[in-house]
Amino acid sequence: MKKEVAVEVSLQEVLAAIWRKKWIILIATLLVAGGSFFLAKQNKSESYTQELMVYVVPKDGTGAENPVQYSQVADIAATDLKVYLKSKELGSRIRQSVSESELSNDDLHNLVKVDKEVYGRAVSFSVTAPRKEVVKRVTPLVLEAIQKDFASKMSVASIENWSGDAQVMHNRSSVSLKRIVLLTGIAFVGTTFLVVVLDLLSKLLKAKK
């Protein structure tokens, strides 16, 4: 018959195991913290954004005498404009003027961001790119495309004016300290648990002998 060995573990023994392996726990925790900080620094990104707003009005004064109809026509045009700003047609037009070395396909996909909020007959959107000079070059292209490709094809509304004089903003993504602290904490708890388990297994094997 096999001999069963009962192993009792006290809190003092657990703490003693942690203390004996304190350098392993410390080094593992510091390695994870340092690695997390390094990766966060490597993935740190920056971009530039210019916010714009375009207004639409019915063609030939359509519905001008009827505020409700006027508003409905403007709303339809604003919705169509939002769709156009995210269209492949606009993307192709921009790609003809901006090379992939200046603007990757992912950057092009995220280039124009349309505000989902409704501001009456105004459509608010922004142009974002990794480099300031690209934003300054692309913004006029977008406005020109709205005027030539979109407004000329609209059957119910036209572009009235736009506000494109806003300064180009510099966006910087900061290192996420919360993420580093979280990963460091997980590393500390995980390493401590593993050290205690291995120490207790060692004790169990010795007791069986």
Image (cartoon, grey):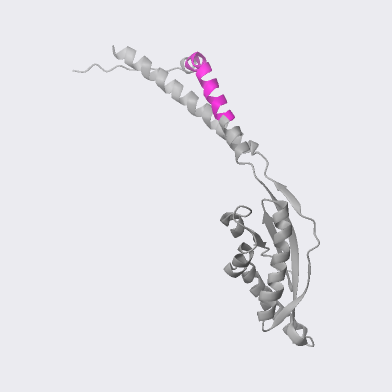
Q: Position of residue 98 (x, y in %)?
A: 64, 59
Residue sitting at the far left: 1
Q: Against 92, is 169 above or below?
A: above
Q: Is residue 100 left or right of residue 74?
A: left
Q: Residue at x 40, y 21 (%)?
A: 198
Q: Nearer the viewer, residue 193 or 163?
A: 163
Q: Is residue 87 magenta?
A: no
Q: Against 205, is 126 above or below?
A: below
Work out which quarter of the rendered image holds the N terminus and state it.
top left
Q: Residue at x 56, y 34 (%)?
A: 183
Q: Residue at x 65, y 62 (%)?
A: 97
Q: Name the quadrant containing residue 27.
A: top right
Residue 63 in view here: no
Q: Position of residue 191 (x, y in %)?
A: 49, 25
Q: Position of residue 185 (x, y in %)?
A: 56, 30
Q: Nearer the viewer, residue 49 or 174?
A: 49
Q: Is residue 101 left or right of residue 143?
A: left
Q: Residue at x 45, y 17 (%)?
A: 10
Q: Name the quadrant containing residue 180.
A: top right
Q: Is residue 16 magenta?
A: yes
Residue 74 in view here: yes
Residues shaded magenta: 15-34
Q: Nearer the viewer, residue 177 or 43?
A: 43
Q: Against 181, is 79 above or below?
A: below
Q: Name the quadrant containing residue 204.
A: top left
